[in-house]
Image (cartoon, helix red, strand yellow):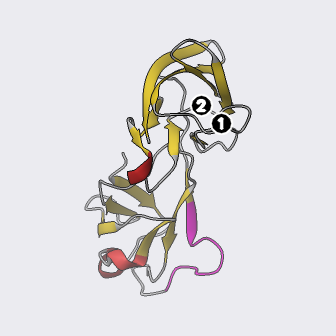
Amino acid sequence: DKSRINLRFNRPVDRQSAAESGNFSLIPDGEVRRSERDSLDARQVNLFLDPANRLGHLGVGYRIRVTGLRDEQGQLLDQQESNELPISTAVLHLDEARPYPNPYRVGEAINPLMFGNLPQGATIHIFDVQGHWLQTLTEESGFGGVSWDLKNHLGKPVASGVYIYRIRAGALEKNGKLMIIR
């Protein structure tokens, strides 16, 4: 889940270095709050993340960086070849697909409006409440998200209001509403 990651190594890890959360980084942002060697499997390290992280299918590729971890014999694990691990999972349905945040308050926004939890290749069609097509977005990165710059297909900013979206992925379809507040 988004607040816990379990890493499994090819040999048993040192309990003390596994418990130093500073040996693990969530990139590009996020915090590993606590880490520990698993009590049943000495090759596994359990990472406990800040639950407010943006980890998930929001269009951002995340990695875990491991530094300073030692095996049970005290040998530093390889720092050159595999100290960063990509985090990826597949989205197979549209149940959790949604715009984020909704409503989107332009003046308070830190991040762009995102459509998240999308299967790769999903398309999002955005319409005004009269049903006029405004924009089409496609998830191409494989990270499960795509941002909308709040512009229509002519490059003009859209006004405050309610908008309709239709997400399609193969035979799957999901419709919903989002609100923009300028």
The residue that appears at 57% across and 34% down in the rendered structure is 158
Q: What span is colored magenta in the figure?
A: 76-85
Q: x and y percent of residue 92 in the render?
A: 54, 27
78 or 22, which is in the foreground?
22
177 or 160, which is in the foreground?
160
- Under mark 1, the amino acid is Glu
Which quadrant holds the N terminus? top left
Q: Residues within 10 Å of mark 1 (few under 14, many from 20)?
A: many
The residue to which callout 1 is attached is 139
Which quadrant holds the C terminus? top left
Whether pointer 2 and pointer 1 mark residues with C-beta atoms closer than 8 Å, the reply is yes
Q: x and y percent of residue 93 in the render?
A: 52, 23
**Residue 181 within the magenta-colored segment of the rendering:** no
Q: Is residue 95 visible?
A: no
Q: x and y percent of residue 83 in the render?
A: 56, 73
Is 156 situated above or below 32? above
Q: Which label sits in the foreground, 2 or 1? A: 1
The residue that appears at 46% across and 19% down in the rendered structure is 176
The residue to which callout 2 is attached is 119
The residue that appears at 30% across and 60% down in the rendered structure is 50
Label 2 element class: loop
- Under mark 2, the amino acid is Pro
